[in-house]
Image (cartoon, coloured by chain):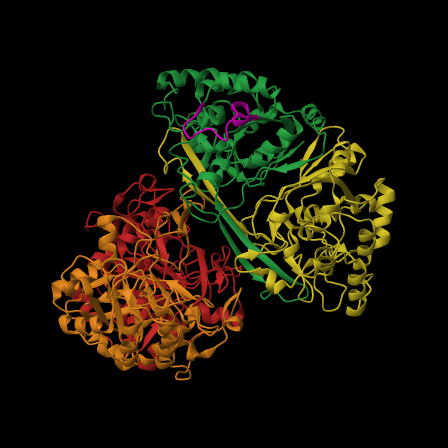
Chain colours: A green, B yellow, C orange, D red
Amino acid sequence: MSGSPAVSRQEFDAIFAAVRTWGSWSPADRGAWNRVTPEHVRRATALVRSGTAVPLGLPWDTRAGPDNDRPALHHMTDLGDVEPAEPATYKDFIAADFHGKAVSHLDALAHVAYRGRLYDGRTAREAVGASGARFGSVAALGPLVTKGVLLDLPAVLGVGWLEPGHPVHARDVAAAERALGVTVDDGCAVLLRSGRFRRRRELGPWDVGAASAGLHVDAVPLLAERAIALLGGDGDSDLRPSPVEGVHSPVHALAVAAMGVPLLDNLDLEALSAACAGAGRYEFMIVVSPLNVPGGTGSPVNPVAIL
Amino acid sequence: MSGSPAVSRQEFDAIFAAVRTWGSWSPADRGAWNRVTPEHVRRATALVRSGTAVPLGLPWDTRAGPDNDRPALHHMTDLGDVEPAEPATYKDFIAADFHGKAVSHLDALAHVAYRGRLYDGRTAREAVGASGARFGSVAALGPLVTKGVLLDLPAVLGVGWLEPGHPVHARDVAAAERALGVTVDDGCAVLLRSGRFRRRRELGPWDVGAASAGLHVDAVPLLAERAIALLGGDGDSDLRPSPVEGVHSPVHALAVAAMGVPLLDNLDLEALSAACAGAGRYEFMIVVSPLNVPGGTGSPVNPVAIL
Amino acid sequence: MSGSPAVSRQEFDAIFAAVRTWGSWSPADRGAWNRVTPEHVRRATALVRSGTAVPLGLPWDTRAGPDNDRPALHHMTDLGDVEPAEPATYKDFIAADFHGKAVSHLDALAHVAYRGRLYDGRTAREAVGASGARFGSVAALGPLVTKGVLLDLPAVLGVGWLEPGHPVHARDVAAAERALGVTVDDGCAVLLRSGRFRRRRELGPWDVGAASAGLHVDAVPLLAERAIALLGGDGDSDLRPSPVEGVHSPVHALAVAAMGVPLLDNLDLEALSAACAGAGRYEFMIVVSPLNVPGGTGSPVNPVAIL
Amino acid sequence: MSGSPAVSRQEFDAIFAAVRTWGSWSPADRGAWNRVTPEHVRRATALVRSGTAVPLGLPWDTRAGPDNDRPALHHMTDLGDVEPAEPATYKDFIAADFHGKAVSHLDALAHVAYRGRLYDGRTAREAVGASGARFGSVAALGPLVTKGVLLDLPAVLGVGWLEPGHPVHARDVAAAERALGVTVDDGCAVLLRSGRFRRRRELGPWDVGAASAGLHVDAVPLLAERAIALLGGDGDSDLRPSPVEGVHSPVHALAVAAMGVPLLDNLDLEALSAACAGAGRYEFMIVVSPLNVPGGTGSPVNPVAIL
């Protein structure tokens, strides 16, 4: 992609080493969420002004498509005719192989290994098996309540969306902070809006694994320096095609495996963008509460921004 | 159960008619959640003191047992050997037929029909089909942010737990309010702790469908009068065996179908009980954010209490 | 499709009435399989010459595609690390919403209703609910052992495959019988080869719901007259687009709902075609053994032709 | 269990070495099924006399219980109201983690490893991963058509069933052959009836993992000498508790990993027992046709005995 200078594997490994926080935290598998203290929670609370709660989760999508190759399941298991009345009960079954491009979900630290190591240097092969993750599971994370920051790039640039393949560099993050009047700081949750779902609604779905707007790896050291707790967006944070040779998801590797920063993938940020624009503020309280799955490498979620 | 006076079907129907709020709300399928205004959100925020976030979701339970007859599923779908590295990715699949006694979940208004009618008088057979609910789905609810109140009955009574079959009457609710210094008021979320999971950890699982502590129907008019938004607990709110002839889950029928009050079932309230005792306060901010399942009759959830 | 004269709804209903066998069988939900007596089994056995067994089931397909919109699931649940050794055990989970175009499966009589009626005139709404089928389930069918006949149309026509949309008329069935030296007679299983999977391997997958070679409704009375027990093929027997106005799957309606003839959909007939060509015979013993699913409307299957 | 002399690990390993057929077959992952030639198929066909087909698959069991800790799933996905009519279609979803004690299934050679090795000496850790088995999958087996022999032990002993824990020794197999007039010979399928499901129907379910009638390891060399192709039964062939120290499923290890003999577990042999008794013959044609799951370690099946 023009504008995305190729990054060698050697350069990437240097970034990895520079942003790595292994050995810093206890419990290690909460990673950067350890940064979020009760004081951060109270400060996040103070960001609530209007009392508007905006959900960020996509609709559960059971239809296969170019950006949904493992569709979620939703089956009715009782239509008032299985269990005895009264009352009659209506029940359903949901299922998802949720990592990928179609389900709003949280990546726990067990989701990504680079050169065989999970976050904190744990050997992936020993830490994760058929019964799940013994280190870095989503159950070790629990919920997160902190300050959220929306980096609404299309709003900054005055466009409907970033085109697939559009890189977001460190300088773009800094420019967005200034333009939107926000500060990415320690313990916060950074949400990057590319306008993916506005584009999808207007132009139809496309193969986001092949081409997505996302963070260039050169932006990651800035996020590391600011000591963020969580990174997310309407994509999966990674720029595709990847600018790093031999690394298909370099931001995943850096955020999750090096920095211990969980990722929020595939959020619907359209309503939040409108709410922030209306309020003239791009900071808010955010609550992310993954399902409590022992050994799980992540969870479907429906995060809530409270303005 | 001694102490649980039998309630005739006629008496039950009179309560149903008395607490019914059909025709009151728009959109109707958000039911009592329409009571929660941005003002309620701001007031809930003001309840945060220490900044402690307590998750209320049980561990995802894949083992069958006397209180888990449809165990949830958790499968690893990638152990770093399916998708190409680098990075290696670890993925999982989760699934649940979540209504029942083993998964912490929210009941949306499409979950319960009494005499063929869902909340707001909708004909259940027309509103819910094999593709899901056209009225009363969990997607219509979205997230809830409001004041939560823990009615910690064992704390009030100075016992480890309420025995299975122990009824909680209107007078017990009122006594708990006084003892715990809380007020059940409009738009709030009421959580009833019976100590189920403390008992389970000490004595082992039992068939909670056969015997559970829970609300007697005589407590429901009080909750209706107070205009609550949400009712939940470590059981499913219903007393079992049911005191109402011919109605196996009378609180479900009253709360969901008559009052439009969603239910939160099977919460783990042990940590919250300890946190409230420690803080000397049984009121807090609560955030409940179900998955955004179009047509879903509910959702697994991991609610968060913020003290 | 040129060559496929449109059939009015009135004409279709006349065919339906003409081929209908309601009230003929006991148990009714075995339908045309009641034709297959022990004598038929013995005669089928006598068709075995070389002792070659040819499976007809497609590979379980977990990848979404234009002809697989609800991909099957296959998860490993133990990789020798869940249950204690010795021995170590490796286990898997399979799942499928198997009706559709991607799984080789049998349609039981509960699968199709026309004008609200299942086979034998049963009211579909009363016979099938969220807990499954009370009439016409696959468990009522059990296994079938009988004579199989391969109507290998591409072999007859000297082409690689029939193009999508190519109709197979009554006269084509009769011509195939003559050309291949076979007789479609009472109690037999008729398998129609269109060459779908040869075409797919050479040209790639396409949306077979939009365009498929298949039986024109004018061929069904001939099959009814011959008193067949089972109809199947490498498609789903139906010609698409449908030649019948307002009826998307007319052969399904006629075979299953009118005649009580179960269908075998999405068979891989390429190896059988080669085996029959090699043997110079298009008749064989066939064994179809669906899973014993009480209330099931069908089953994934891997039928075996024995030459 | 009295009557089950303890077998040391050393003795077990000697049996393992004695019955091992590694390096004998090509393709190796069809193992002992390579013994079944077209000639065996023809001879099996000649065993059909009456033309009675008896299915051996248990009902798909969705209820948890002492012998069903991972219940199968069966969901209706269309009740005529999802896809457009006409015709209306009724569809379902089935799923199972089928190894265990509740689903009639076939174990492929990838299911069992002893001392880290699958059949033919393949290293299990390299051969099986999260995407399935690269060696020994059920897709490599395909269908089996051969002579079946029912070793109906309760019929031989004149009892309703063998009590849980009852061992079947080599001498019992030989005695059963004489009493029933059958010969276990090369390429045949041996089915052992313990009467498990008659006992279950009369006395209720029990934990068969803790106590089951089954083959003592001393019977395995006889089966190896006879060069059987398939072993199965109404249990999982193994005697429990195991008579071998440190090996919980010794017959699984010997049959699958040493001999390359797939296993058929949890068959319902009650109807076959009655049919054989009625016919006065305990030999028949058997057809086992697993689903064609690439990489699968086995498959649910509904084998058919044809008398």
Q: Which residues are magenta?
A: A151-167
Q: Residue at x 31, y 39 (%)?
A: D126
Q: Is residue D303 left or right of residue C114?
A: left
Residue A161 picture location, percent across and down? 49, 30
Residue B247 picture location, percent across and down? 72, 65
Residue in front for this viewpoint, D175 or D160: D160
Q: Is residue A84 left or right of residue C40?
A: right
Q: Quadrant of residue C49?
A: bottom left
Q: Quadrant of residue C112?
A: bottom left
Q: Is residue D6 left or right of residue A193?
A: left
Q: In the orientation shown, which residue stands out farthest toward the bottom?
A: C24
Residue in front for this viewpoint, A168 or B71: A168
Residue B79 picture location, percent across and down? 41, 37
Residue A217 picture location, percent across and down? 44, 21
Residue in front for this viewpoint, A307 or B208: A307
Q: Answer whether residue A158 is magenta in the image.
A: yes
Can residue D274 be seen by looking at this rendering? no
Q: Residue at x 70, y 61 (%)?
A: B121
Q: Quadrant of residue B189?
A: top right
Note whether B236 is above or below B286 in the view shown: below
Can residue B166 be seen by looking at this rendering? yes
Note whether B42 is above or below C299 in the view shown: above
Residue in front for this viewpoint, B100 or A245: A245
